[in-house]
Amino acid sequence: MHLSDDGYNCFFIFFTMCHIFILIISLLVHCTIANEYGEYPRFNTTVISNILNRLTDKSTYDKRLRPKYGAEPVDVGITIHVSSISAVSEVDMVCEHIASLNLFSFNKTSIE
């Protein structure tokens, strides 16, 4: 059994986008938590740049093309559930929040 090339490319692009999204969310959460406690994070920007460059390598990823270009569009959904919002500071515009994020795709790739 193997995945068709078109299905593999679609999966790879979706998988890459999920990783980029998770990386960005992780960085934002880290910055928010560190900022609340007065600790500013010290990021090694070279490492972050290398990770993002590897995920968006020009030889395997073309940001101009959507998944399954030339076929039916891939339906991608994002669900965000905010569990709680508390301690909103009107002076500093800082709030504490708890949220969960789910990414899903309605991909109909055939496996042969």
Image (tube, rainbow, N blue to C red):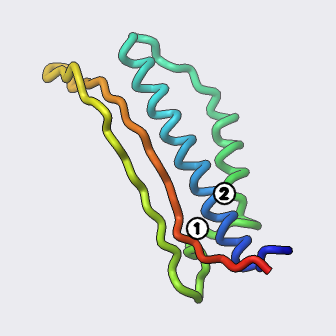
Disc 2: CA contacts within 10 A as few (<14), some (14-19) or many (>=20): some
Compared across the picture, whether 55 is left or right of 66 comes to right
Which residue is at the far top? 38
> Where 13 sits versus 101, above or below?
below
Query: Could you give the CA–CA distance between mark 2 and mark 1, rounded to whole angstroms?
Result: 8 Å
Residue at 53% from the left image edge and 48% from the top image edge: 21
Look at mark 1 in the image and give the residue it sits on. Answer: 63
Give the quarter of the figure containing the N terminus.
Answer: bottom right
Taking the view exactly as shown, the residue that stands out farthest to the left is: 90
Label number found at residue 30: none
Tag 2 residue: 56
Q: Position of residue 48 (x, y in %)?
A: 64, 37
- Identify whether 88 is placed above or below 104: above
Q: Residue at x 58, y 67 (%)?
A: 63
Residue type of the residue flagged with mark 1: Lys
At 65% from the left and 47% from the top, the residue drawn is: 52
Name the quadrant containing residue 8.
Answer: bottom right
Return the disc, 2 or 1, that comes first in the chain's sequence: 2
Horizontal arrangement in the rendering, residue 11 relative to residue 24 (left or right): right
Nearest to the observer: residue 2 or residue 17: 2
* CB within 8 Å, label 2 to label 1: yes
Picture mark count: 2
Q: Is residue 13 left or right of residue 5?
A: left
Q: Position of residue 73 (x, y in %)?
A: 51, 80
Residue in front for this viewpoint, 81 or 62: 81
Element at label 2: loop
Three-letter code, disc 2: Thr
